[in-house]
Image: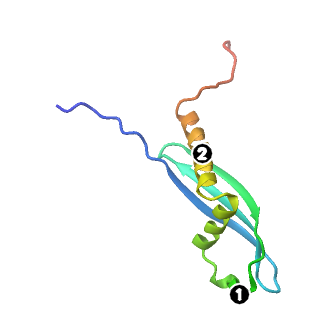
């Protein structure tokens, strides 16, 4: 009979755009509100943030209706600091999942 194995849960991270703020005259987005979620199938953690975006070069304006979630997530991640910051956010969320799975702090009293 094979020995039981305990697989380490794989954490999945999901970036999303919660809201965009734009000027109504030209549709240029100046603030993106984003979320990052992490789950290992048992526990979950999330983060929320917002970041200001610079006005694009007039030759590179993408109409608001043509923006995609992936494009804006790329803008947000680049503005945050690229892969290094994405990894930092992922590590912080992973630490929250690890704390949920094996708490290192507790509260309460030892009597009833």
Which of the two marks, 1 or 2, is nearer to us in this view? 1
Residue 78, quarter of the rendered image: bottom right
Which residue does the image show at 60% across and 76% down from the upper left?
A: 68
Which residue does the image show at 60% across and 54% down from the upper left?
A: 86
Q: How many marks?
A: 2
User: Regarding mark 1 in the picture, which secondary structure is present there?
Assistant: helix
| 109 up-or-down from 41: above or below | above
* Residue 12 x/y as whole percent: 49, 52
> Which numbered circle lies on residue 59?
1
Which residue does the image show at 60% across and 52% down from the upper left?
A: 84
Q: Is residue 24 left or right of residue 108?
A: right
Of 38 and 76, nearer the camera is: 76
* Residue 46 x/y as whole percent: 63, 50
In the image, farthest residue toward the top = 111
Residue tagged 2: 93
> Which numbered circle lies on residue 83?
none
């Amino acid at each position: 009979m094979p020995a039981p194995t305990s697989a380490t849960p794989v954490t999945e991270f999901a970036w999303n755009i919660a809201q965009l703020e734009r000027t109504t005259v030209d549709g240029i987005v100046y603030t993106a509100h984003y979320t990052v979620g992490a789950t290992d199938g048992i526990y979950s953690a999330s983060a929320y943030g917002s970041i200001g975006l610079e006005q694009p070069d007039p030759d590179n304006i993408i109409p608001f209706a043509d923006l995609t979630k992936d494009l804006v997530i790329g803008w947000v991640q680049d503005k945050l600091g690229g892969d290094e910051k994405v990894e930092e956010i992922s590590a912080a969320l992973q630490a929250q999942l690890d704390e949920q799975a094996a708490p290192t702090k507790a509260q309460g009293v030892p009597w009833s």
